[in-house]
């Protein structure tokens, strides 16, 4: 079975062409840790008491490949979302946790394409993959900028919208 | 001539053919093609509907030569004008909604003029047509950007030629003096004077539409008979074909008059017929009924008699048709939108049907399929010698596949039209804008061009 660390290595594209793929993100991009230790949730205090399996549908004796992989993907998504832990920056936390959330949606949508036959649901799945992989790319890039500190360049040309009263 | 029984025996199952295709693709590389049938000036151009770009492939290398930009991003260095703003990339759907965007929206149809020196492509959302010089590969009417620099684009995009709502496929008249654009949203054609269209694209205060031609609801495309005297109009709203006498004057301009309207509800009960092409000998029109999963063949001369109606499997959703005729046989290919899970090396792929055109009229049938090596195959076109076939795809490759997240074009060796051999799967990559990368996405039309030569398609 492919471990999450291996899978993350694949997403990271270590030694491969996938490094430049728009929806490949590195674990350290969202939580600053090494892929080899990515599964070691005990190192992060915020995930100590989380039992992801509590939230997943139970699999019966006649489990289908779809159900099996769906549970696996959802478990991975939950684990990856909790992995970064909270910082003192709402914007950074949102982006760091939303990236694996989107990757989970992409993984689930791909499963639907492999196993599902309703044309309109398949179309939705295609749109989820299309949109969310670009949003991952945007979130990774924005996260990198925000991690360097407050984005002072915004004052050069004020943002058109997305503002709030401080 | 090919022994038909031997061929049928050799392609008795799709599986055998697709297995050989899989083996061929495994050994494919992008640089291995150099053929006397391909000239240095040849190019393949694709319209990418979601990215509003045109990809240009050099068939001598099967590599992307350039991406033609039809967007207005990065003409100004200030954030509202940029594609990527401080790391934030808009989705393809959202990008054209950015404030002050004035580039193309939903680039879709495309066609070459008779000497292949220019193509027209439609902007469905922008209600216009862009003209592209196929030798310089520049958008006609673009002007130098006064703010050009390291952080900005070199050109300001032309507004193109305004034609009307929901333009689908453009078609040049056989004289090359007119461009007919099917306006699905207006139930009519815009007939443009090509000279005026070039002037309008350059921003001159002129309207290139010389007349509007009312026709059946939802016109998808017009295609002309080889002599240019008859225009066939298909529709994506009604089960009809409208036929016009073009009445070409000595000046090369038309004065079309409706000859007849044919009911095709038996072949297309849904009224969704998006594409047609005339055969190289000029005798037949091959018409794709996408939702009805079939193709019909009609005689050009006389009363447009129905010669064949070929049914595909349910859900095949045929898009375009292309003729491939060489010393080894005469076939018609039909690209399917349907995506099958049992593609080469376990990767999902669409199929392309092979129809034997040497069979007598009334007996044409599908004699084989091959995988397109991409998802949702759409535009297809051969080189002039009919030894290469290029295939556009609408959908990206899925995660976990060799070109994941990329829109791809496939190329086949069709020297033996009955046994296409996969040469390469070409990822279209991205348009490199100063602010970031705009990924080329959702190819629709594809044209193989030999600039300066007479049109080699039907």
Image (tube, helix red, strand yellow):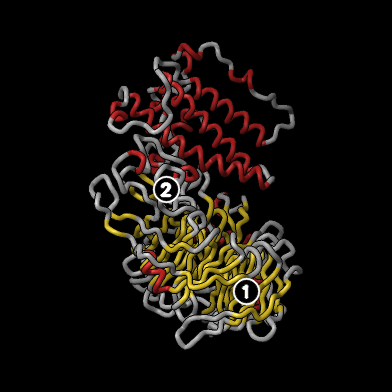
Q: Residue at x 41, y 35 (%)?
A: A138
Left or right: where B138 falls relative to B369: left
Vertical position of residue B270 compared to residue B80: above or below? below
The chain holding disc 1 is B
The chain holding disc 2 is B
Q: Is residue B165 visible?
A: yes
2 or 1: tag closer to the N-terminus: 1
Q: Count the numbered circles shown.
A: 2
The answer to which quarter of the image holds residue B383 is bottom left
Quadrant for the N terminus of chain A, please. Answer: top right
The residue that label 1 is drawn on is B286
Residue B136 horizontal/vertical position (percent): 31, 67
Vertical position of residue B214 compared to residue B272: above or below? below
The residue that label 2 is drawn on is B439
Front residue (pair B365, B311): B311
Residue lying furthest front in this view?
A: B205
């Amino acid at each position: 079975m492919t471990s999450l660390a291996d899978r993350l290595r694949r997403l990271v594209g270590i030694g491969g062409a996938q490094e430049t793929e728009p929806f490949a993100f590195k674990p350290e991009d969202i939580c600053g840790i090494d892929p080899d230790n990515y599964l070691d949730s005990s190192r992060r205090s915020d995930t100590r008491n989380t039992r992801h399996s509590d939230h997943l549908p139970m699999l019966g004796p006649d489990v289908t490949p779809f159900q099996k992989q769906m549970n696996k993907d959802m478990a991975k998504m939950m684990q990856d979302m909790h992995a970064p832990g909270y910082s003192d920056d709402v914007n950074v936390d949102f982006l760091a946790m939303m990236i694996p959330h989107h990757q989970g949606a992409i993984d689930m949508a791909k499963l639907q394409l492999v196993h599902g036959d309703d044309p309109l649901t398949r179309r939705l799945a295609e749109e989820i993959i299309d949109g969310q992989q670009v949003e991952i790319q945007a979130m990774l890039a924005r996260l990198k900028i925000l991690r360097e500190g407050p984005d002072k360049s915004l004052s050069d040309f004020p943002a058109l919208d997305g503002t709030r009263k401080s | 001539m090919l022994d038909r029984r031997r061929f049928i025996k050799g392609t008795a199952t799709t599986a055998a053919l697709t297995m050989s295709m899989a083996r061929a693709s495994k050994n494919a590389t992008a640089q291995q093609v150099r053929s006397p049938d391909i000239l240095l000036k040849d190019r393949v151009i694709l319209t990418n509907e979601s990215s509003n770009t045109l990809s240009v492939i050099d068939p001598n290398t099967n590599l992307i030569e350039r991406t033609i930009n039809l967007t207005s991003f990065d003409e100004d260095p200030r954030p509202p004008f940029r594609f990527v703003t401080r790391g934030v990339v808009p989705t393809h759907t959202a990008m054209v909604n950015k404030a002050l965007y004035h580039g193309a929206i939903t680039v879709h149809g495309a066609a070459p003029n008779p000497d292949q020196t220019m193509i027209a492509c439609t902007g469905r959302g922008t209600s216009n047509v862009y003209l592209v010089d196929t030798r310089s590969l520049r958008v006609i009417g673009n002007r130098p950007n006064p703010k050009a620099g390291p952080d900005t684009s070199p050109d300001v995009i032309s507004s193109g030629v305004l034609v009307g709502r929901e333009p689908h496929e453009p078609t040049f008249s056989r004289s090359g003096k007119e461009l007919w654009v099917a306006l699905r949203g207006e139930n009519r054609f815009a007939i443009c004077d090509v000279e005026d269209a070039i002037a309008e694209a350059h921003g001159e205060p002129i309207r290139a539409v010389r007349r509007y031609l009312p026709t059946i609801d939802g016109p998808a495309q017009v295609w002309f008979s080889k002599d240019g005297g008859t225009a066939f109009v298909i529709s994506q709203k009604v089960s009809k074909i409208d036929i016009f006498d073009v009445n070409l004057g000595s000046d090369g301009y038309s004065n079309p008059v409706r000859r007849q309207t044919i009911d095709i509800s038996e072949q297309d009960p849904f009224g969704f017929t998006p594409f047609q092409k005339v055969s190289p000998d000029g005798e037949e029109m091959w018409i794709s009924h996408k939702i009805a999963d079939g193709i019909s063949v009609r005689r050009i001369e006389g009363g447009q008699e129905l010669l064949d109606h070929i049914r595909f499997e349910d859900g095949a959703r045929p898009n375009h048709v292309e003729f491939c005729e060489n010393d080894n046989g005469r076939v018609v290919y039909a690209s399917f939108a349907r995506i099958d899970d049992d593609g080469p090396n376990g990767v999902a792929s669409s199929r392309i049907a092979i129809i034997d055109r040497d069979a007598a009229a009334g007996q044409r049938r599908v004699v084989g399929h091959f995988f397109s090596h991409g998802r949702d195959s759409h535009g297809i076109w051969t080189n002039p010698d009919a030894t290469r076939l290029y295939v556009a795809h609408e959908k990206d490759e899925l995660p976990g596949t060799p070109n994941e997240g990329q829109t791809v074009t496939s190329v086949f060796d069709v020297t033996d039209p009955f046994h296409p051999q996969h040469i390469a799967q070409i990822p279209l990559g991205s348009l490199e804008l100063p602010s970031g990368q705009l990924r080329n996405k959702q190819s629709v039309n594809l044209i193989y061009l030999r600039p300066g030569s007479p049109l080699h398609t039907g």
